[in-house]
Image (cartoon, rainbow, N blue to C red):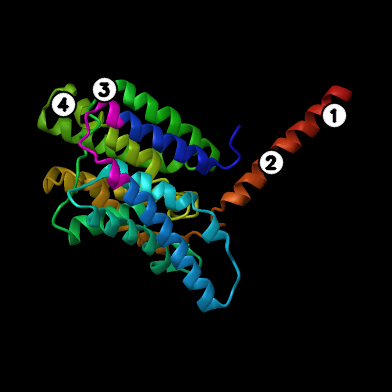
Amino acid sequence: MLLKDIRDYQILFLSLFLVLGIGTRDWTLRPELIGVAIATCSATQWLLSYVINKEQKTNDTGHMKNLRSALITSLGLSLLLRADHWTTMAFAATSAIASKFLFRLGDKHFFNPANFGIISALLLTPDAWVSPGQWGEEWWYGLLFAGTGGMILQRIGRWDTTAAFLGAYSLLEAIRNLWLGWTWDVYWHRLMSGSLLLFALFMVTDPRSIPNARIGRVIWAVCIAILTFILRNYFFISTAVFWALFALAPLTILLDVLWSAQRFSWGDREDKQAGEAEEVGEMRGILNNS
């Protein structure tokens, strides 16, 4: 791997998606709003980290110096959220980063930052909107998202969450399709959405805000799929996935209590993978010498 931290790949891929969307999908996206999102997320991350260090009288500058999380959040907002005024994007970015510091239990935040910023802007500003169909239904977008997202999920070990969400949601849609007697092209039309895949691969799998235990993650993802299905098909909310994730984010707290497990840590994950690679190397050396 050329990049040591998997978050660097997230930043690379999200940047690629942003360039791809602007270049191939004719998005009416203003470059200055992307700059506002990046600058506001980074500044908010630094400022709140500084304030907390002062209040707790600590000298932990890790959050202040490492702005990868803020950059990932700003790219997610740029990909999904649209606004007429820069103040709306700045409000969404500030809300997104602030949610990590305000809504937490112990050392864990339970709202996905980008999702929290999107919902905050939709609720509290007059000019914010999300376009779930902005990627269309071209198959090669799906392959690109699945390939890049799959690489990240393999590294962080959260395939179970994506599989549970997509499996439950596609099953519910299939049952509804059979019940209504529709043809299967309608079914595939509802599933072949680039935005749905982006959500399933890059948002609902955020390892720092979802349940720690595998059983908790599976239950949580299935619940989100059920609520998404209800909101989309019975309340006709096109942005159902984002509202479902927002509404069920606090469920993470209960699931972590019911099924305890070690919280995900980027450093621990890298150390573990390095240790596994070292063990494999040692085993190969033993076999070659025997």
Of helix, strand and loop, which one carries label 3?
loop
The answer to whether marks 4 and 1 mark residues whose Cβ atoms lie closer than 8 Å is: no
Q: Earlier in the sequence, mark 3 or mark 4?
A: 3
Location of residue 237 in the rendering, given as x and y in whole percent from the top left corner:
15, 47
Q: Earlier in the sequence, mark 1 or mark 2?
A: 2
Q: Earlier in the sequence, mark 4 or mark 1?
A: 4
Point out the frontmost of discs 3 and 1.
3
Label 1 to label 2: alpha-carbon separation: 18 Å
Of helix, strand and loop, which one carries label 4?
helix
Crowd rating for badge 4 (residues with CA inside 10 Å; few <14, some 14–19, many 20+): few
Q: Is residue 161 visible?
A: yes
Left or right: where does residue 284 sit relative to residue 257? right
Q: Which residues are magenta?
A: 21-34
Crowd rating for badge 2 (residues with CA inside 10 Å; few <14, some 14–19, many 20+): few
Of helix, strand and loop, which one carries label 2?
helix
List the residue tagged with mark 3: 138
